[in-house]
Amino acid sequence: MIFETILSGASLFFSLDAILLTMFGCFMGIIIGVLPGLGPLMGLILMLPVAFYLPPVTAMGMLIAIFVGGSCGGAVSAILLRIPGTPLAAATLLDGYPMARNGRAGDAIGLAISASAVGGVLGGLVLIFFAPLLAELALKFAPPEYFALAITGLISIAVVSHEGMIKGFITGTLGLLLATVGTDPFSNAYRFTFDNHNLLSGFHIVAVVVGLFALSEMVMQIELGQLTKRPNVQKISVSLRSLGLLLRHRINLVRSSMIGTFFGSLPGAGGVISAFTAYAVAKSRPLDEKEIYGQGAEGGVVATESANNACCGGAMIPTLALAVPGDASTAVLMGALLLLGFQPGPDLFENNLDVAGGIFWAYLSANVFLFFIGILLAPVFVSVLRIQKMYLVPMILLLSVIGTYALQSSVFDLWVMLGFGVIGCVLRKLDYPIAPVVIGIILGPICENNFRRSLILSDDGAWIFWDRPIAASILAINVLVILWTLISHVRKKDAS
Amino acid sequence: MIKKLLSAAAMFGLVASMSASQPALADFPERNIQNIFPWGPGSAMAVSQIIAEAMGEELDVNISVVSTPGAAGVKAFKTAMNKPADGYTLIDGYVAPLVLQPLLGNADWTHKDFIPLHAATANAFAIVSRRDETRWKDLDGLIDYMKKNPGKLRYSTGSRGNLPHMVLAKVMQSADVVARNVPYNKNGDAIKDLHGGVLDFMFHNPGHYKANKEKSKPLAVLSDNADASAIYDGAPLVGDLGYDIGLKGLSPTGWNWWLVRKDTPPEVVAKLRDAMAKTLARDDVRQKILNVGFVPTGYTSDQYDDVISKVRDDLSSAIDALQWEKDKLKSVR
């Protein structure tokens, strides 16, 4: 069945049009991902009307390539400017930006691109060979398991908060509180909306991320001065060398890719959790003692980027196998498939095996193209570092405004961006980490909704979390991790 | 410096609002049009995109479908109502935000606050359980099981207080049985949990059913339209099984009209209306919509008030089912 799918799909995908448009999609995706605010979702929405006029596999190839390229592109601005182009790249800046500051911008981008590409290919292979198995596994993950996983994600705050664990939990809690704004799906009550319809679905995560990271960073750059100074940046060439660097982290690469694929295959879990979880795991198992996370560890970039892009392949699994989209981007991909006249789900494998196979090829090829296009474009991206701040800062502010406004054509989102820019500045001035705010806002609804949903589903209250073996195991591991973190924290304190 | 940033942002807001409030010009449309869609991406959005794409061809501009989910569609309506009434913002008027939410006291408009362009589509709902379900074979079996196990079964209608919730609550009220409604942000997640054995039954629209035929078994179609049964492979209509839910015609089904704000210039409305009518008359468009499992309803703008008023009356008499469900659940616990 698997080989039949692959063989029948090859004839549909391997045409000049499909290959060229997949390459074009990849290029577009990277560019869109680099720009603050514009992520893969925006790229897909922009290019969807074009897809109507293309043959099905060609159209899906282009769209999937935008999804893949966009998921990686955000890393470039995170590394160079400390501004995640997309929320997916919020974890990448933790070590990517310090690498760039240490004069290793080219290596960081090269690693990010190759880790994304290889992670994507690994995720794609899992998609092809294990989609039915993972789809069955996803069915075993119900609200109690999602709640337990969300707790795991929240624990990662302790790991990513290089400024201090307590400070991290404080800003993480701020994120959780901000996540309560909007309509409560259980009672339809409006929470903290202050009669403002713009708040009915809470704060838009992209406006929050752009405000927290991009605006605060620009303010910091202006404060540092030297606006007219031409930065002295060496000419950087990114080459296949990055693959060599990547191979040093092969265990981290495979492990993080599997984490990404796993989280991707669970609808609603998402790339952001996978990136932070992969980062937390990588940090707990550094390559050697010289690799210090938070100060430019290559492993940090490898973990987050491979998990991010492997997550794309993972998210395609429930989309194609169960017709349940893994996230908003795959929901648009599923809509595109419907518009092109194909029904995602078991029906696709039953009646349109060649199209399913073509989509597999498109996904794998998009990741291969990502590597070559990314490596070719990297010197262009790195040249951004040579732009004087007096030009760079207004350009980034303008792009941030355009990207955020384009989300919903909403001026309110600009105010949200501005507000979070102020919050970002204050937190950074006080040396509080800002990544936990993003983790809190993303995980808050997953945590709360699945906790409440579990209690409605349960016949005997909170025992549902122990009655279900997977949820109980994850929660038990969470308790052990918390205890281990606390004990090592106390020991460190005693030692110092 | 912060002050400068604030003034720049305020300036941007001012420019954006000024440009948005320019009056409609005679040679409408001169720029792209937005359709404010009240749900997240999925099969319903795909259908709106089919119509938007074809209608854009008729008008020679691009019509983008902007997903604006939140508060059971209320956010999309409020967002659209805050845009100028110049025809460049269309409202994808689904029954939940147009009729049901005002009835529930969550919105302060009526259908008369909008001008209809044309009815778009309808989609009948069905009650489904898993194909491999062994506890019951049909709706009667499910009802019997619920009678023996009051309040024990778990079902979902996606979000709470929406039309499928009201219709399913009405079915249960008519049979005097009750189950626990579990809300989900996305219908897809509920379908996954149905197939995973966490939920016992749920609602499907035609798009859900087409994608999940192998695993979902329709027990009854929640409509009195015999054609709706064919969409669900001949599943019986709920009325034919002896359950009177008191809802006829469009009332128990999901449907949408495309609307504009009340004060939109008549010549703009006429142009949009004509383009939408031409779009929905096109065979290729109708076929694409049918392929997703939705049905073009064919109602024209002059039927708007009659059709919606009747639905409104039906729904207002059925709305007590939601409160009944709450009370009944309390009493069986």
Image: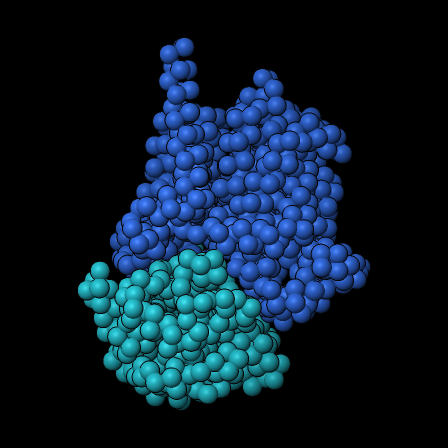
Is the residue A54 above or below the residue A179 in the image? below
**Farthest top residue?**
A495
Task: Report the residue at 71% width, 56% height from top.
Answer: A2
Task: Report the residue at 22% width, 67% height from top.
Answer: B328
The colour assigned to chain B within the rendered structure = cyan
* Residue situated in front as seen by the camera: B185 or B243: B243
Where residue B88 appears, as percent x and y from the top left, is 47, 70
User: Hey, which quadrant is residue A92 in on the image?
Assistant: top right
A1 left or right of A144? right
User: Hey, which quadrant is residue A189 in on the image?
Assistant: bottom left
Task: Report the residue at 45% width, 44% height from top.
Answer: A470
Where residue A474 appears, as percent x and y from the top left, is 44, 39
* Residue situated in front as seen by the camera: A247 or A348: A348
* Residue situated in front as seen by the camera: A323 or A420: A323
Is the C terminus of chain B in the top left, top right, bottom left or bottom right quadrant? bottom left
Where residue B10 appears, as percent x and y from the top left, is 38, 49
Task: Report the residue at 55% width, 62% height from top.
Answer: A323
Is the residue A269 above or below the residue B330 in the image? above
Q: Which chain is blue?
A: A
Where residue A395 appears, as percent x and y from the top left, is 55, 42
For the question of whether residue A359 can be seen, the reply is yes
Q: How is the image coloured?
A: by chain
Number of marks in the rendered image: 0
* Residue situated in front as seen by the camera: A59 or B244: B244
Is the N terminus of chain B in the top left, top right, bottom left or bottom right quadrant? top left
Is the residue A204 above or below the residue A59 in the image? above
For the question of whether residue B18 can be seen, the reply is no
